[in-house]
Amino acid sequence: MEAATLRRPRVWLPVVAGVGVAVTLGVYGRLHDPAGTSGIGDALRLQSSKVWLATTVFLLAAVQLTTAFSLYGRLPSAPWIPALHRWSGRVALLLSLPIAVHCLYALGFSSGSPRTLAHSVLGCLFYGAFVTKMLLISRPGDSRPWMLPLAGGLVLTAITGLWLTSSLWFFTTVGF
């Protein structure tokens, strides 16, 4: 039997893990009782902080896109581009965690409006796609060449959708 055939099932393990993460987050967010927030003033300050953190994550995602194009030879590159790509991704993930924890714990998975439903689904998609991307990176010989850019594109799409359904909505509804 050919070696590539023996490895083929492992190609989909990162995808299965990512789907598992996304579904687990969605189920947890839907089934637990949201804690809510302590008061209207506190809620507005907290929401404002989340909006600016999310905007920073969105801007770092733009850095990720630009550096990915550079890594794939679509834009000029420099020796520091791979490090910038890795570190902008790490910082973006770290900044996204307090937002996600608050959204899951205090608000849960919401389907109260099309915007909040889309936001909830995109939040789950983001972390699922991120897990898939990280697992694909850790085993480069086991995946197809198109899988990593696809996972990265899903991460970027989810971040963009999250920003549109949260930060942009907040800026246009509440203000800066």
Image (cartoon, rainbow, N blue to C red):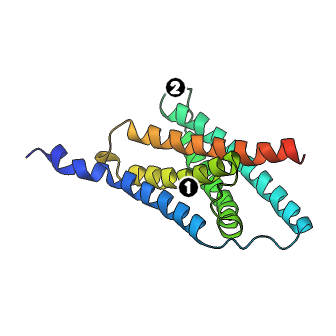
Residue 137 locus on image (x, y percent): 42, 50
Whether 140 is drawn above or below 28: the answer is above
Spatial separation of the CA atoms under disc 2 and disc 1:
30 Å
Q: Nearer the viewer, residue 148 or 12?
A: 12
Asked whether residue 158 appears in the rendered view, the answer is yes
Q: Nearer the viewer, mark 2 or mark 1?
A: 1
Q: Nearer the viewer, residue 59 or 41?
A: 41
Q: Nearer the viewer, residue 110 or 105?
A: 110
Q: Residue at x 58, y 51 (%)?
A: 121
Residue 118 locus on image (x, y percent): 63, 47
Asked whether residue 80 appears in the rendered view, the answer is no
Q: Which residue is mark 2?
A: 74
Q: Residue at x 58, y 40 (%)?
A: 157
Secondary structure of the residue carrying tag 2 is loop
Whether 63 is drawn above or below 10: the answer is above
Residue farthest to the front, as pictured: 112
Secondary structure of the residue carrying tag 1 is helix
Whether 79 is drawn above or below 21: the answer is above
Whether 131 is drawn above or below 115: the answer is below
Residue 111 locus on image (x, y percent): 64, 54
Residue 40: name its quadrant. Answer: bottom right
Q: Residue at x 70, y 64 (%)?
A: 107
Question: What residue type is disc 1 on?
Answer: Cys
Question: What residue type is disc 2 on?
Answer: Arg
Q: Which residue is mark 1?
A: 124
Q: Which mark is residue 28?
A: none
